[in-house]
Every structure is written in C-alpha cells, then in structure tokens.
Image (tube, helix red, strand yellow):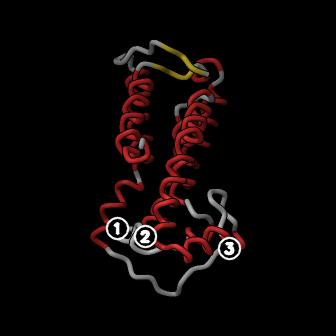
Amino acid sequence: MIEKFRIEISRIFVAVLIIVIIISDSAWETQAPFVSAVLFMVGCVLVGVASLGRLWCSLYIAGYKTDSLITQGPYSLCRNPLYFFSLIGAVGVGFASETITLPVVLFLVFTMYYPSVIKSEEAELSKIHDDKFQTYFRSTPRFIPKLSNFREPEEYVVKPVVFRKHMFDALWFVWLLGIMEILESLHELHVLPAIFNFY
C-alpha cells in the first residue's frame, strides 16, 4: 500500500532532509577541514555518477515504463538500475553534507524502504509480461549490476517529450547539492544558525 505513494514519501523525506541541513552543520568543518573536504569531494563524485546513471536509465525507460519490458542498456545489468543509481545519489548527497552520519542514515532509510517498492513493481511487471519477465528475472540480478550481462542495441527509439520531463527528475541530486552549498554559505555568513553539529 505504501509503495503507491513512493513519490510523495520521497518528496516529504527530501523536505525533512533540507530542514535538517538548514538547522545543522558539519563538525568536521571546524575540527578537521581536510576530512570535511574529502567527504564533500566523495559526495560530488557519487552525485555525478548517480545523475549520469539516472539519465542513462531514463533514456531507456521514459515513455515505456510498464508497457514494454526494458531489458537492454542499464536494464541488462540489473533489474532496478534507476534505484541503484538513486542509492548512490542519496549516499552522495549525504557525504556532500560533509558528515558521515547523514550518508549512513540515508543508506539505512533507502535499504529499509525500497525493497518493498521493488517487490511491488516486479509483481506488477510479472503480471503484465508473464513468461518474458520470468526469463528476465532469472537471468538478471535484482539490484547489484552484473557487468558481464551488458547488452546494448545499435539503435533505440527515444520519446523526446517524455525524456525531457524525466531529465529534470534524473538531475534532482544535482539540484539538492546546489541547495546544500547555498545553505552552507548562509551558515558561514551566520545568516542561518546551526542548532546541531554532526560528524
């Protein structure tokens, strides 16, 4: 039941995350600036990988979703590459906060919530595509990509209107990174007070 409200729950969670970032700061920033810088760089790399990965997934899935069973490109590596890259992005945003606490929390929340979403979506795909999905299910891992499975078509029909809409969703980790940098600047200027400090 809760899986039906995945997008709404994700938006609420992001809003709560932004509030936490608004009222908190990294303890590493003052106590160990080098650690703070490394955490931020790791976060930026992960967000970059996640954004490119989500764009790649969107290229294949935009406009098709459940109507067609997509099994090529990123979907040949694992059955849920969009969620795989989303996890990387969430952890990346956590590290970009220059803390260790936030990426751990985001990882735990993701791993507790999304397995049920994935199972629900796979049950729907199984009903729609039956034997074709069962073959795909048996040959392709659920979450961790298997590089030896990679298959890519020479040509692929993209629906540009739908893909354009998906582009903005695919890049929301980048937007969040920008928001975090603005909030950090406001903390440094003492415009926003930091009530909590996290390691």
> What number is the disc on residue 163?
1
Looking at the image, residue 132 lies above or below residue 36: below
What type is the residue that disc 3 sits on? Answer: Asn
The residue positioned 43% from the left and 70% from the top of the image is 59
Q: Residues within 10 Å of mark 1 (few under 14, many from 20)?
A: some
Q: Which residue is labeled 2 in the image?
A: 59
Q: Residue furthest bottom?
A: 154
Location of residue 162 in the rendering, given as x and y in whole percent from the top left corner: 30, 67
Which numbered disc, 1 or 2, marks the residue that appears first in the sequence?
2
What type is the residue that disc 2 sits on? Answer: Leu
Image quarter for residue 55? bottom left
The residue positioned 44% from the left and 41% from the top of the image is 177
Location of residue 77 in the rendering, given as x and y in whole percent from the top left corner: 63, 68
Q: Quadrant of the C terminus?
A: top right
Residue 159 lies left or right of residue 69; in this view the side is: left
Cα separation between marks 3 and 2: 19 Å
* Badge nearest the viewer, 3 or 2: 3
> What number is the disc on residue 149?
3
What type is the residue that disc 1 sits on? Answer: Phe
